[in-house]
Image (spheres, rainbow, N blue to C red):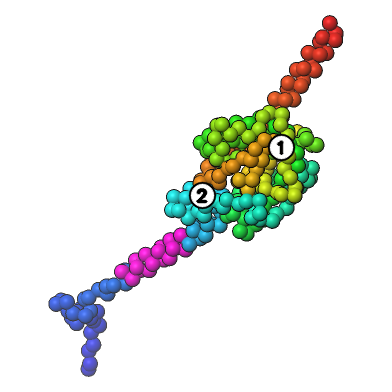
Amino acid sequence: MHIRFLSDGSEFRSYGGGNFSKKKEGNGGIFWWAILITLLMGAATFSWFFSIMVFQHPEKPFNYKMLAKFNKLEPLRPFTTFTVPNGKKVNARELLTEFYPYSAEQMAVKNDVLKRSFIRNYKHEKPLYVVGNYKVLSLRMLTDKDVVSEGWVVRARATDLEDVDVEIIMPGLTVKDEPFRVGDVVAIDGNKPQVTALHVQRMDGDRICVTTMPLAYTNFTNATATLKMTPPELLNMDAYWPVTRDTGSAMAAETSELADGTEVAAKN
C-alpha cells in the first residue's frame, strides 16, 4: 500500500536566502523613471509652444516685456518718405465705413494685428495709412504712462466728418518742439502716406478714434517747419489706448450749456 501525504512545500523553502525567498526588485524604479521622463517631455512641449506664442504675439504686454528683457525685439526702423512700405490709404469717411460694423471681438483682433505689424516693421503685414485733413482739438507731451514716453501727442478731428478723431503720436520731440496749436489743421497728404494706424477705439455716439504714428520720422511737417522725430526704443504695451481723453462728451456738454443759456436769455 502506498501512502502519500499532501505537503505545502514548506520543507523545500530556503531559510538562507534562496531563490524562493528573494523578492523581485527594480520594477518600482522603472515606474518612477517613466513618470519623470513623461513630465520632462510635457515640460519641453509646453516650453516649445510657449516660445512660439511669445514670438508670434509680441503685441501682448507680457510677451513684449519678456522679449525686451532678453533683447529679442528688433529695433523700430526709421523709415523715410521714400522707404515706407506700401499700404492701404483711407480717409476719415473710409475709416468709419470700414470699422463701424466691427464687433468688440473683431476690433480687438484687428488692433492686435495693427500693433503686431508695427512692432515687426511691417515685414508680414501692410500698414494702414490715414490721410485727410484734421483740426487739432488738444495736444500734450507724452509721459511714462503712455505707450511712448517721450514726445507729443495731438488729438484732431476730421474736418469733413466729426465722427472720426485721430491722435498722432510724435515720438522724440522735446518741449520746445510744440508741433501744432489748437485750431490748426493737420493735412496728411495722400500722395505721400506716412501716418500709420496703431489702434482703433469705438467711442460714444458711434464715433471712432484712431491712434496713429508717422513712419517717416524725419519728414513730417507743420505750417512752418519739418518735425524731426525719432523711433521709440521701447513701447509701453500696458498703456491705455487711446492715449488722449475723448473730448466729444465735453464739447457736447459745453454746446448744450450754451444752448440752454441762449434759450434762457431769449425767454428773459
Which quarter of the figure has residue 30?
bottom left
Question: Which residue is label 2 attached to?
Answer: 64
Q: Residue 171 carries which label?
A: none
Q: How many marks?
A: 2
Expressed as whole percent of the image width and height from the top left, the position of residue 204 reads 72, 33
Q: Is residue 34 magenta?
A: yes
Classed neighbour count for the residue bearing mark 2: other residues with Cα under 10 Å, few (<14), some (14–19), many (≥20): many
Secondary element at image label 1: strand
Which quarter of the figure has residue 95?
top right
- At 29% from the left and 72% from the top, the residue drawn is 26
The relative height of residue 59 versus residue 134 in the rendered view (above or below) is below
The relative height of residue 186 versus residue 2 in the rendered view (above or below) is above
Q: What residue span does the magenta drawing correspond to? A: 29-47
The kind of residue tagged 1 is Val
Identify the mark nearer the N-term, 2 or 1: 2
Which quadrant: the C terminus? top right
Expressed as whole percent of the image width and height from the top left, the position of residue 237 reads 54, 44
| Residue that extends furthest to the top in the rendered view of this protein | 268
| Residue that extends furthest to the front in the rendered view of this protein | 224
The kind of residue tagged 2 is Tyr
Q: Which mark is residue 186?
A: 1
Secondary element at image label 2: helix
The relative height of residue 37 versus residue 230 in the rendered view (above or below) is below
Q: Does the magenta stretch include residue 20?
A: no
